[in-house]
Structure formats: C-alpha cells, structure tokens
Image (spheres, rainbow, N blue to C red):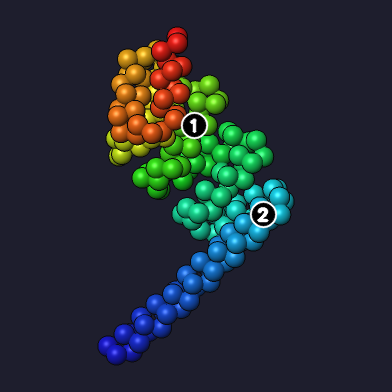
C-alpha cells in the first residue's frame, strides 16, 4: 500500500512539473509577444500571442493582446473572432464584451452588437460604455425608445460625462 502511495505522489509531482513548464512556455511566448507589440512588429506579436494560446487555450491575457494587435493592424473581424473565443470561457469579461460590441457596430452589425451590450448591461446596468453602445445599436435597429431610455439612464448616473450630453444633443437634433 505504501508503494502505491509513493507511486501516486511521484506521478503527481511529475504532472505538476509538466504543468509548470507548460505555463512557463505560454507565459514566455506571451511576454515575447508584448515586446514585439511594443516594437511595432505586428505579425511577430500576433504569431507569439497565437503560440501562447496554442499552449494554453484559456490564457485570457493572450487573447486580449491578440485582439488588440489585430485592431492595431485594422483587422477588426479577426479581433472580433478572438474576442468571441475569449468570451466562451470568460463570459463575464465586460471590457472584452464592450469592445466586441463596438467592433460589431463598426462592421454594420447592430443586432449582434445589441446582444453584446445587452449582456453587459444585464451584468452591470450602469456600465457607461455599455449604455452608450446599447443606445447606438438600439437606434440603428429601429428601437429609438430603448435608445432614449439607455441615454437617460446614463445622463442620470453620469451627469458630468460629456458623451451622454453630446449624444443627447445629437438625438434631440434629429
């Protein structure tokens, strides 16, 4: 019985060592990707972030950095795809969900954007970026009353936020 216990302990220690190497390799690729990004070596950075994700498929920081790199290259649809993958295992990543909604709006997909902003507001009803995005997407999908409600909620919650005042002026002039 003692021999079996020792064998199990030995096997677990080997697995723990392998997991540590796995994490270190992903972290190294990620850090190298950040350095490449700082040097504006975009394709290299993208490759390194992809490598980090291949090593560790739930490395949220690598997904976020990959999306940012794609955006820096003007590849919005690639960034949206990466953010969608991230949100599959990190559904509460509010900033990533807002960014995905903003990309979808720019890509002319207001219904899909509205769904993303709705999820943001379900989690945080007073998220300023969520309210603004929701209002824009709602307006584009013909839900002007819902857009107005979101803007009013934002103005009440954030009276000093110029984005809500500017949006109110634009909405009133139409």
- Most extreme residue toward the bottom is 2
**Residues tagged 1 and 2 counted as in contact (Cβ below 8 A):** no
Which disc number belongs to residue 38?
2
| Residue 88 position within the rendered picture, expressed as x and y whole percent measured from the top left | 41, 43
Assess disc 1: are there few (<14), some (14-19) or many (≥20) residues with their C-alpha within 10 Å of its C-alpha: many
Locate the C terminus and report the quarter of the image it occupies: top left
| Residue 87 position within the rendered picture, expressed as x and y whole percent measured from the top left | 42, 43
Locate the N terminus and report the quarter of the image it occupies: bottom left
Picture mark count: 2
| Residue 48 position within the rendered picture, expressed as x and y whole percent measured from the top left | 64, 55
- Distance between mark 1 and mark 2 Cα atoms: 24 Å
Which disc number belongs to residue 129?
none
The residue wearing badge 1 is 102
N-terminal-most mark, 1 or 2: 2
Residue 111, can we see it?
no
Is residue 158 shown left or right of residue 76?
A: left
| Residue 2 position within the rendered picture, expressed as x and y whole percent measured from the top left | 29, 90
Q: At numbered mark 2, what does the secondary structure look like: helix, strand or loop? A: helix
Q: Residue at x 41, y 83 (%)?
A: 10
Q: Nearer the viewer, residue 4 or 127?
A: 127
Q: At numbered mark 1, what does the secondary structure look like: helix, strand or loop? A: helix
């Amino acid at each position: 019985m003692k021999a079996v216990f020792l064998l199990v302990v030995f096997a677990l220690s080997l697995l723990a060592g392998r997991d540590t190497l796995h994490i270190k390799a992903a972290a190294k690729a990620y850090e190298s990707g950040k350095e490449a990004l700082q040097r504006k070596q975009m394709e290299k950075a993208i490759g390194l972030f992809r490598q980090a994700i291949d090593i560790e498929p739930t490395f949220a920081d690598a997904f976020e950095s990959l999306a940012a790199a794609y955006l820096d290259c003007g590849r919005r649809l690639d960034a949206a795809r990466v953010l969608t993958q991230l949100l599959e295992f990190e559904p509460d990543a509010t900033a990533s969900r807002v960014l995905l909604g903003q990309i979808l709006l720019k890509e002319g997909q207001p219904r899909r954007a509205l769904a993303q902003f709705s999820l943001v507001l379900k989690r945080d009803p007073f998220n300023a970026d969520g309210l603004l995005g929701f209002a824009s997407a709602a307006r584009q999908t013909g839900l002007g009353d819902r857009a107005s409600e979101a803007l009013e909620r934002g103005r009440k919650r954030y009276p000093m936020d110029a984005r809500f005042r500017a949006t109110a002026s634009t909405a009133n002039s139409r």
